[in-house]
Structure formats: C-alpha cells, structure tokens
Image (spheres, grey):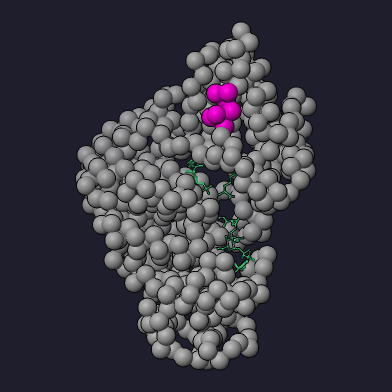
Amino acid sequence: MNLRDLIKGLSCETITGRKDLEIEGIDSDSRKIGRGYLFVAISGYRDDGCNYIDAALDKGAVAVVTEKSVNLPDHVTVIKVKDSRTALAKLSSNYYKNPSHDMHLIGITGTSGKTTTTYLIKSIMEESGLKCGIIGTMGNIINKEVVKTGNTTPESLIIQKYLYEMLKSGTEYCAMEVSSHSIFLKRIEYCEFEIGLFTNLSRDHLDFHKTMDDYFEVKSRLFYKTNKYNIVNLDDEYGRRLIEKIEDSKVPLLTYGFDAKGDIFATDVKYSLNGVNFLLNTPKGSIPINFNIPGKFSVYNSLAAASCAYAYNIDLDNIKKGLEKVQGVKGRFEIVPTKRDFSVIIDFAHTPNELENLLTLIDEFAQGRKVVVFGAGGNRDKTKRPIMGEVVANHCDLPIVTSDNPRDEDPEKIIDDVIVGVKKVTDNYIKIIDRREAIKYAVENAKPNDIIILAGKGHETYTIIKGKKLPFDERKIVEDTLKELNHER
Ligand SMILES: CC(=O)N[C@H]1[C@@H](OP(=O)(O)OP(=O)(O)OC[C@H]2O[C@@H](n3ccc(=O)[nH]c3=O)[C@H](O)[C@@H]2O)O[C@H](CO)[C@@H](O)[C@@H]1O[C@H](C)C(=O)N[C@@H](C)C(=O)N[C@H](CCC(=O)O)C(=O)O
Ligand SMILES: Nc1ncnc2c1ncn2[C@@H]1O[C@H](COP(=O)(O)OP(=O)(O)OP(=O)(O)O)[C@@H](O)[C@H]1O
Ligand SMILES: N[C@H](CCC[C@H](N)C(=O)O)C(=O)O
Ligand SMILES: [Mg+2]
C-alpha cells in the first residue's frame, strides 16, 4: 500500500522524507519486520521500541513511526506522532481497509463471562445461518480455524488483520472480548463497534488499574465507541453505575437481569448439576431454555448472549436452539471423566468473585468433601491473592494452595500471599509448589464422593514459569494419575 494512503487520517506532528513509497507491511516488533515495512516504535512497560529502530532498518524497514525525535538516514521516512499505540491502530485499520466498518462487531467487556458469552453468541448466530468469528482468550476463530495469540484482546495490528480475514471468508459478525488493558493501551482504537456489552465488574487487575474506580472508568470507554446498542447487566452494581454514566448516549440501551427489571430477563430459574432451566423473557415474547452449563452465572451469560441476538432481531427459536446447542466451553465447569467414586472439575475461576460463585454452586450439589487445588498468577494483581485464599478456605474442606503461572515471580512467595487469606479461616490446608504434584496429591488421596476442583487454569494447556511457556494439561495429569492408581490396585 502506498504510504500516502496508509497515513490517511493519521494525526502526525511531522513527516520527513518521501511519502510516495510502497509499504509492504507494518509491525511494532522489530523482529517481525521485513523488506519495505513500516516500523512503529512503541515505548512500552518493559522496553522502548526506539531502541530497536536500527534493528528494524537492518531488516528492511523504509519508514518509522516514533514519538521521539530521532536522527535517521535520509532514505528513511520518519513520521513523528504524539501516541505510537494510537498511530499503530490507525495504520493497521487503514492497511486492512477498515474492516470493522463493514462488519457487525460486538465488543464484550467485564471481569467475568466474556469468553463464555462470545461462544454463546457464535452458537446463536450460526443457528441463524450467520457466520460469526471470535477474538478472545482462547484465540481468534474464523470458521473452524483457531489461532492463538497470547492476549485476550490482541494488539491492534492483529485485531485488524483478523477482522480483515473474517470479512474475506464471508464472516460478517465478530464477538470480541475487550479487556481493560486493550482499551487503555489503544488496541481497540478505530474498531467500529455496533454493540458494547457489559457483563459485570469485580476485583481483578488492580496491579494495572490501581483502583476499582479506574478499572471501571477504563471499561466504560467501550460504550462511547458503539453505534447500535449498549447492553448492560442490570443486576451488577457497576452495570447500574455504567447506565448512569452513559445516560446521555444517543446509542439505545438494552438491559438484562433476573426478574422483570430489565428488557431481557430470566424467570422460573431451576438449577441442577447438569445445567440450568429458565424462562427467557424479551419484549417480543418468552421461551423456555434448557442450558447445559450449571450455575447462576450461566443464566447471566445466556441473557447477555440472548440480548445481543435480540438486538440483531434474531428470533426466539434460534436463540433457544443456539443456547441449547452449547454443551460446554473448554475449561469452564469442565468435568474430567474419572470412572471412580469422586469427581474432578476444571474451571477458569481466577478471581475472588469467580471462586466464590463457583464454590457456592458446587456447594449445592456436593455430597462429599470439596478439595480445591488453586493458586494465583504471577505478574498480576497481588491484592486479590489473600482474598482468593480466604474465599476458597471459606467454601471448601481442603484448600491445596499451589502455583498458577508464576511468570517472573517466585512461586512460593505468591503461594504465601494466598495462604495469608487461607489462614484467616483455617490451618487445615496443604501447600505444594509444583501444581502437577498438587493435582496428583488431590487425586491420589480422594475419598468417595469428593469433588476435586482445579481452579484457575481452565482451558490453558501450558504453564508460564520464569518467562517460559511449558506444556501443562490438567486433564492429562488427572488421567495419568488415575492410570497409575489403577495399576497399583
Ligand atoms: C501490560 C501489557 O499489557 N503489556 C503489553 C505491551 O507490552 P509492553 O508495553 O510492555 O511492551 P515492551 O515489552 O515494553 O516492548 C515495547 C515495544 O518494543 C518492541 N520490541 C521489543 C523487543 C524487540 O526486540 N523489538 C521490539 O521491537 C515491542 O514489540 C513493543 O512494541 O504490549 C505488548 C505488545 O502488544 C503486549 O504483548 C503486552 O502484553 C503483555 C504480554 C501482557 O501480559 N499483558 C496482559 C497483562 C494483558 O494485556 N492482559 C489483558 C487482560 C486479560 C484478561 O483478564 O482477560 C489481555 O487482553 O490479554
Ligand atoms: N457471568 C459470570 N459472572 C461471574 N463469574 C463467571 C461468569 N461467567 C463465568 N464465570 C466464572 O469465571 C470463569 C471465567 O469465565 P470466562 O472465561 O467466560 O470469563 P472471561 O471474562 O473471559 O475471563 P478473562 O478475563 O480471563 O478473559 C469461569 O470459569 C467461571 O468460573
Ligand atoms: N486473562 C487473565 C487470565 C488469568 C489466568 C490465570 N491462570 C493466571 O495466569 O493468573 C490474565 O491474564 O490475567
Ligand atoms: Mg476471556
């Protein structure tokens, strides 16, 4: 693409050098630069992209975007901007021909339920004959192809690339998880959202946002970027705050919740271990839903997805079929087969609120002990650690405190932070640093009717230790332990 076209609408302070250049690609990572590329230098949290300009030029970059004044050879075009991350988003959108403009883009934000809701939306859309892609924690999905990217909401360049590819493959709907990091770090700038959906807000990410008010404020920015509907969970305290905050928005509001308060609401809710049945009520009528994932939060996620479908005029029969077709979402209340007299459940609960919800749900059906194997992530919110410990200790018979992606931190230190909370409730806990050993311990010592809950890693099939991503699949560890036990019998 010609540089003149690429920088259309980009607010730049100065441009030196040729504008009439053919640009073969763009990137903000010098290691991915190729011949004829434009390099966007971003000053990050760990490093400064400006330190890699020379490396980018060596690899063939012909133009550089930077926030700082730099002296480069005359043949290099230098574009100075105020904010490189915003510039990257604009350039990426231009490069991929502003794909979101031609799509039905749904942005889902909130602390919990985003991934699950994207899968429910996709299922409903497909039941209605509409192709729907996903951008989120478990990867980017176009048709049946899943591409993992690492972050829940990837960098703007990747977002635009996948939106472009979705359009190219005839996928006109996209359900995208929008993390607060991505809003703050401008990954979603120049995405034209039709719908913004707010699930809930509870304690997490206070390493990054410092206060809940900051966290909320950043999340609320999504709802100024929408042009069709804002959809908000009315039962959530922060949801209600959001409704007040966006009161003067010209975009219509749809609300959901339990009982007849919102536009879309659930009544006659009946819980069981296999799922939840409820009546879905909308302004256009009501329909019974038999949903296959248990728990109150399943009702909320169904309502969120149903509200979104309703906003697109999808009829109730297809909403029902789409929701009921979902058998489960990987790592969310996933039951691992044991063929023994105890159960193992893998769940992605990694915040105090998620653990509380999960364990309260299991409480209703548990006949034996609840044993929870859990930890807290390294390089993440430290304030949630003791609270997670306290919540788990309050809701189970045996907490086994272990590691969960220690990343660059000392795993034992993280565990000790969690144990501070556990000890407020009980001294009856077990500390095993190696998560594999912790899982093995729980399985080997299981008693009849025990429910072993492996919390925090959900779908993840890796562990991050000292910056390295190593294979780690909890399903496989349970399976191998059971095999060993069978062998011994
Ligand atoms: C705090 C945060 O979000 N950081 C993100 C940020 O990294 P950074 O600003 O620290 O980048 P940096 O390492 O300082 O590097 C600066 C620049 O130098 C460049 N560089 C670096 C080295 C080199 O050799 N050449 C080079 O050009 C880098 O490409 C980068 O552009 O920009 C990077 C590139 O986009 C992201 O990968 C990185 O996410 C890190 C890995 C991360 O862990 N983020 C988490 C906290 C996150 O974003 N989580 C949310 C929420 C999850 C949820 O709850 O669902 C998410 O959306 O995933
Ligand atoms: N609506 C909800 N409210 C509260 N907890 C929920 C809700 N939906 C799911 N959960 C719990 O949170 C966990 C994570 O769910 P999910 O992956 O859908 O959330 P997410 O918002 O995508 O999380 P992340 O921020 O890590 O991407 C689930 O395993 C479950 O324990
Ligand atoms: N998207 C969340 C996932 C956390 C999952 C948990 N396993 C951990 O590593 O803390 C995060 O990156 O904060
Ligand atoms: Mg997610």
Percent coordinates x, y for residue 40 in the rendering: 54, 75
Question: Image quadrant of residue 321?
Answer: top left
Q: How many marks?
A: 0
Q: Is residue 477 magenta?
A: yes
Quadrant in which the C terminus is drawn: top right
Write the residue at 41% across / 48% down.
146
**Magenta stretch prevailing secondary structure:** helix
- In the foreground, 61 or 117: 61
Q: Which residues are magenta?
A: 474-480
Quadrant in which the N terminus is drawn: bottom left
- In the foreground, 237 or 147: 147
Q: Is residue 444 left or right of residue 219?
A: right
Write the residue at 37% across / 48% down.
145
Q: Residue furthest top?
A: 489
Question: Image quadrant of residue 374?
Answer: top right
The answer to whether 353 is drawn above or below residue 95 in the figure is: above
Percent coordinates x, y for residue 369 in the rendering: 61, 19
- In the foreground, 193 or 61: 61
Q: Is residue 226 left or right of residue 11?
A: left
The answer to whether 7 is drawn above or below residue 403 in the figure is: below
Question: Image quadrant of residue 229?
Answer: bottom left
